[in-house]
Every structure is written in structure tokens, then in C-alpha cells.
Amino acid sequence: MQIQFTINGKSQSVDVDGKTPLLWVVRDVLNLKGTKFGCGKAACGACTLHVDGEAVRSCSYPIKFAEGKKITTIEGLGEGDNLHSVQQAWKEEIVPQCGYCQPGFMMATAALLEKIPNPTDEDIDNNIVNICRCATYYRMRKAIHRAAEINGAT
Amino acid sequence: MAEEIKTRKKGIRRRKFLKYSGVGLGLMIGGVYLTRHMWRRAIFEGAETMLPPYGGETGQPMIWFQVTPDNKIKLLSPKVEMGQGTFTSLAQMAADELEVDMDRIEVVHADTDSGNIDPMSTGGSLSVAGLWQPLREMAATLREMLKTKAAEKLGVAVSALSLANGVITGGGKSMTYGEVVEGVTDWEIPDVPPLKDRKDHKYIGKPIPRIDLHDKVVGAPIFGMDASMPGMLYGSVVRSRLIDTDMSNFDVSEAEKMPGVVKVVKSDGFVGVVAKSFTEADNARRKIKFDYNIKKDWNLSDIEEAIKVGNGRKAVIQKEGEAVEDIDGEGEVLEMEFRSPIGAHAQIEPNGALAHYEDGKVTLMLSTQVVGITRNEVADALGIDAEDVNVIPTYLGGGFGRRLHTPNAIQAAIMSKEVGKPVKCFFDRKQEFQNDTFRPPTHHIMRGKLSPEGKIVGLEHNFASGDTMFNSAILPVSSGTLENMLSADIGSIRGGAIMYRGIENHRATYYHVDLPFATSFWRSLGLLANAFAIESFIDELAIKAGKNPVDFRLDHLLDDGAYGTRIRNVVKACAEKSGYTDKPSGDRAMGFAASIDAGSPCAHAVEVSIVDNEIKVHKVVAAFDCGIAVNPDQVRAQVEGCICMGISASLFEKMDLKDNKLYPTIYGPYQMALMKDSPKEIETILIEGADVPLPVGEPPLGPIGAAIGNAVRRLTGKRLTELPMKLT
Ligand code: FES
Ligand code: FES
């Protein structure tokens, strides 16, 4: 079926089976590889992107529901060459190790900061529930606080 | 006369290079045959400190480096980047010897066509430690080669040249490295020049930000899963859900009719679907019918029954003095048992490979820890020469030992050959869990004797484990032979020897048990479980002796100016920095533990409390001696990662087995540490107790489990003896 949506500010239309997970459309049809496949079952968060500003696990989001929506992936998180404050903070704290989970975490964090500009540790614990096998959580927490600071929320 | 001197010089140089060359392991194995018992002892005794030499090419700078006309230097790394920060450290090492700024150096994975192939693996925390000498030698040699050529081109003497950030100046003229290499096809390789002193290093020892940082925060397509080729199709292969089972009578008729299917491939070892998209391949694969023929029924209880001290093949890895039961004199004998479960790797990027077979040649792109071995395996499977296979390694979305086996590479190559297009084939998450090469379960019996004065007079560690070493793809010899020679699994015994050499009688005995499913390397191998058992028991002995556990440890560690002293130093530094006390305060208590692995000792002091009947780790102080920290920031990152992954393994992770099915097969039910479980405070003290870099990526996993258990013991009076540790 034909599905129309906006991705990273550009309008886009694709012709795929409506049940196809958004993740595979983004990765393999639109060739945006920053959104990752980890489990395909909404259990790890590696595929997190934004649909109308909400953090969504795209592996478990059939493309047909994307009709008319605004999608943002890690590639569109910053503006042009300017990194988003979350990416900036991630860099300052040197968070990534293997890096595979990190786009998902940054997308989840960016969505969190929209809702809670200056999250407490408890807010972070309750809302950032992706999995990082390299276990970079300690630096991620610092980076989340740092991003809030860059945003002027503290 | 001059000729004679030259030859002799060459001879010396050749011997020196042998140390780092591919025949290292071969010689070692040859040696084992000659003096088997001597070697075994040496290997076991040295298991905590022995570093195997780097096995790849170390004589030709030109296959390590490419200097480009824009005056950039590409370093072709034979080691892969799986998160350890290796690429950054390698760039630092190269920059210092090449006398260029870091941003002139780009590190890329060497494809096998480049010739810079590690015949073994990226693992054992040996990338920086193993390349420390050869890489700096190659960089320094290249620098001298560039100087020689520049002198020729500039028409001045080499001694009149000066270097600054890739520019060579002499006789009032200057040239970039990029200009020097232009048009040069023949290079003379001189003897290795003297390497720079520590005091002259500009980058080594500095906390330089990771060089892959930008790519990793913008989501650049750098991983195996991101690889693509024009016209690429997707493969999905049928995998067994059951262990100790054959599959037969494949019926693919329904699958063939599914949308998007290009071909169902039935090969010698597998059946797989090739389709236009991953979802189509995956959906069609699920329609393939087949029969399971279960060879033997297995449940977790059978595995626990098998993994018991006394079962399997025995190897004495340490034997000093008497067995505990034979020690004369007064004293109290204590015995405790410990267990650890089957652990999954659970790295987030699944295993997979992209292969293109064309005109008898194969190009492969994948995340793997075994680049050279994969090339050979694919060549063997397709009946072509290794030279006709080019493996292009990508960044790894986590390694941890999970990528030492790459069945996808062979399968993708065969499917590509069948359909004449590039094929990408990877595990889904369920397959990833069910077909993991697990961390083997273990069983430990600790026995100790305390004198009336509260000194340990005898200590024994008896332990049984499934295999880590011998069904691994890492070793280029058949496993039977190797086990026969070594008689113990030198992976499972990591951290298994008693480091308290001040105890008069100490022994460690290992039992190697065969299991009906694949077990292999899992970050730090035996260390996690062995250190948990030994360090929990030491804590219990300290309590029995009425001693502070830090002093108690120091009482039994030799101050020998080497091994023992380095362990003492991390113990002391950690205790001091953390303000360790064995008295609980409020709802919190501290726990302390230490271990040594691959020559790098580490101590942890943790602070825990119990929240809703669950163990919560608030703070960890680590003291770690890995010799020279080439990049202290990345060493700290590894320590933090080990601590948190260790918390995950110590408190949550566990595979179960029922009716031949290993489960869970998804995150969540396979419980792992999340943000909420990570300590909010981690402090790392680095001690430089050796004048070379030593392994970093695994040794800090050792003490964490016991440190947590020891804290819980102080807080609740309860000794937890099983991983994952649960209060009820
Ligand atoms: S891939 Fe979507 S949550 Fe894991
Ligand atoms: S950085 Fe490797 S999984 Fe998160």
C-alpha cells in the first residue's frame, strides 16, 4: 500500500506492505541506517525514533500507522551540521563504546527532555529503559544531565 | 667483514620478530609436545600473567599504513573496534612515533586483501597490549623510511632533517609526507629504530576523546548490519530451537510461494530463504517445515548434575604444599560451594554477514572478531582459495566473545552464489539467544583452613566448568589435540588460581565437563565465576578470623616486588579511596574484593543497600593496574563498562533449559542491568604498575560479583553463593 509521511522534515511516500515495521522502511527503503535493529520485539530500544515527537520503538510499529505522521530519526535530530544538545552532551561525556545502542538512547533522551526538561535521577531511571550491553549507563546519566544543562533547563 | 656484521644483525632482527610472528602459537604447541608437563605448569601458572604474542605481520610498515597525497595517514588495523576504544589508542601510538598530530591519522579496519591480517582474533583484551610493540615499531620504521626518501628528494642528509606534524624540513626546503611518497614504488625497510621514551610521548597516556565519537553520535552506517551493496537481497536461515538435535525432512513448498521470495536454498549444512526484504525472508523461513530428531533429552537439572566438581577431565593447575585435609596442626576447616549459571552474550547487534559471490570470488562485509579465520572458513566452504575471499570488517555492535563464530558468513556466501546477487543474512533475536555460544555454567568447592591466630594455612579452589576454549573458532588447531596437550581449558581457568601466594598450602584443580550445547568465550571467560567463588570465600574466612577483610587479604598477599605487590597496591589504593569499612552504616554496607587477570590486578569496593528485597549497588570504587594506560579515559570507560556488565551478570542474568530448549530468548525475560541498576557513582583509580600496557577490557569484571556478595553478607548476615545473586 501507499503510505505518506514526513521524515526528518521531508515529505516521503513509500509503497510497501502495511504490516512492514517502520524500522525496516527507514533502514532498507529509505536507507537511513542510524536507527538500529536489536530485537524486533520492542524489548531493547535500539530502534527508537520519534513519531510526532513521541519516542517509539519502530521495530514494532507497522508502517501503516505512520500515515500522515512526522517521523524523526537520529539523522534528523540535529539541524543540518549542528548537533542536537543531546548529541553534544553525548560527545562531551564520551558516552559510546561500541555505539550500536546509542542512537536509540539519544532519541529516547531527546523525547524525555521535551517532556521533563530537567529530569531527576529517578525520572531518568523510570524513562530511559533501553538496553546497552556495553553498559555505558554511568556516562549516559551524566550526559542526560549535561544535555538538560546545555538546554538551559537547570 | 661488513657483510658479516650485516648478516649477523639481520639474524638478530629475525629472532626478535619471531616473537611477534604468526608461528608463535605453533612453536608453543611444538614445545608442548616435547616437554608436555613442564609446559602445562608454565601455562597454568602463567595464566594470570601470560600474554600471547601478536600473531600477524610485523615486518612491513607499508601494509600497516597508507600515506595519501593530502598528507593523511591511514592506519589499517588488523584488530577490530568493538567498543574497547582500540582504534583511538592505536592512533595515539602511531601519531607519537610518526610525529604527526592525531587528526592526520585515520584508523580503518584492514580488509584481508590488504594483507594486514590477524590470523587469530580480536579478543583476550590484547589489542592495545599486543600491538604496543609491533605497531610502534612499524610507525617508527615508516618515519625513518619517509625521512630517507625525503633526504633523497630534497638532496640533503638525513641528519639535517627535522619533522613537524607530517612535514619534513631540511636545507631550507620542506615536503609533506604525502609529497614524499609520491611516485615511490620501492621502499627499503631499515632496522627498527629506537622507540620514543615515555617522556617524549605527546599522545600516549592522554585522555584523547575516542576518534569514532562523531560517527557514533550521528548514527553513521558503520556496523555490519548497516552494510549494503547494490542489488542486495536478504537471507534467512532455519536454525534449531533445540539442543542435541538433528533436523531433517525439510518441506519448503509453502515457503517458496511466499511474497518476495527469490529462492529457497538447500545446502549441505543449512536451509535458507533468499527474498527481497528482511521481513519477507523471515516470514517465508517460518513456513519451512521439518522434523526434529532429539538425540537425548535435556533439562537444566541435567546440566547442573553434569557440572560438578569431580566430573569430567581433571587438571591440577596449582599445587603448592598439602591438601587442606592433610595439613597438620590446630585450626578450623571451612568449606563452601558456589555456582554460576549459563550466560548469554546478548550483544545488541545480531550476528550477520553480507556476501557477494562473483566470478569465483567472494566479498564479505561483517562484524567479526575473527577476520582471518572467517576468510579461510568461507574459502573452504566454497572450495576456493583464501586469496579469492576478501573480508571487509566493519565496526562491531558489541563483541564480548560472541563473534568468534561466524556461520552467517558461509551461509550468506553460499546463498549469494545460488542467486547471483549480494545476500545479507543475520540472526533474529530469538536465533541469537538460542544459537549463542554461551558462558558455561560452573561449580566451585572452596576449602580453607584457619590457624587459631586467624591465618589461612591452606586454601583450595576446586571447580568444574563447561568448555570455553576448545570448540571455539579461535584456535587454528583441532580442539582434541590442543586439549590433549594442555589438558585444561586455559579459558575456563582464568582467575581460577589462588593469588594469595602467602598461604603456605594452596591448590587449584579444574574439571572440564562436556555439555550438549556450544559454550565459548564470554568477556573475561572463567574470571567472573572464579573470582566470585574465591573472593566470597576469602571474605567468609576473614569474618571467621575476626579480621578486617582488607588487612586479611594483605596478610596473605606476598610483597614480592612484582605479582603480589601489584595486587597489594590495588587493594590498598581501593580501600583507602573508598574509605572501606566492614561495619554497615544505616541501610548500607560496603563489600570488598580483588582479582588478577592477564597480568592486570583490580580491586572493587562497593556500597549496597536492599530496596524492596532487591540488591542495589550505589557506588563502586575501582583500583586498576593495567600498566601504561595508553588512553586513560578509555581505560576508565572499560572499567565502568565491566562494573556495570558485571552487576548485570551477578544480579540478573541466567539462561534456563527445558525439554532441550534454551530460554529466555528475548531481552526482558533475559533480565539485564538497565539504567536504574547502574551505580550512580563510579570512581576509578589507575595505577601504572608495569612499563607496558596490559589487558584492560576484561580484568575489571573479576571482583564485582564477590564485592557485591560481600557487602550483602555484611548487611544481612546472609552469604549468597549462587550467581545471579537473589535474596529469596
Ligand atoms: S529492535 Fe526495536 S526494541 Fe529492540
Ligand atoms: S555502546 Fe555498545 S551496546 Fe551500548
Image (cartoon, coloured by chain):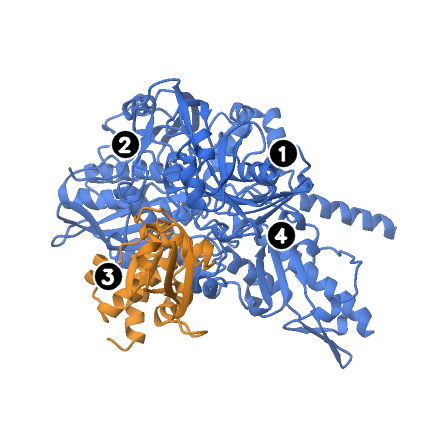
Chain colours: A orange, B blue
- Of all chains, the one bearing label 3 is A
Q: Which residue is mark 1?
A: B382
First along the sequence among labels 1 and 4: 4
Q: Callout 1, which amino acid?
A: Leu
Q: Are marks 4 and 3 in contact (CB under 8 Å)?
A: no
Q: Callout 4, which amino acid?
A: Pro
Q: Are marks 2 and 4 on the same chain?
A: yes
Q: Quadrant of residue A55?
A: bottom left
Disc 3 element? helix
Gap in Å between the C-alphas at discs 1 and 2? 46 Å
**Residue drawn at (28%, 48%), measured in percent from left and top?**
B673
**Residue drawn at (78%, 79%), measured in percent from left and top?**
B171
| Residue B262 in the image, given as x and y percentages of width and height | 52, 40
Q: Quadrant of residue B721?
A: top left
Disc 2 element? strand
| Residue B157 in the image, given as x and y percentages of width and height | 80, 71
What residue occupies the far front of the structure in this picture?
A1
Q: Which residue is mark 4?
A: B134
CB of residue at label 2: within 8 Å of ligand 2?
A: no
Gap in Å between the C-alphas at discs 4 and 3? 45 Å
Q: Which residue is mark 2?
A: B338
Disc 1 element? helix
- Specify few, some or many for label 1: CA neighbours under 10 Å numbering under 14, 14-19, or 20 or more: some
- Of all chains, the one bearing label 4 is B
Q: Nearer the viewer, residue B39 or B695?
A: B695
Q: Callout 2, which amino acid?
A: Phe
Q: Which mark is residue A124?
A: 3
Q: Callout 3, which amino acid?
A: Ile
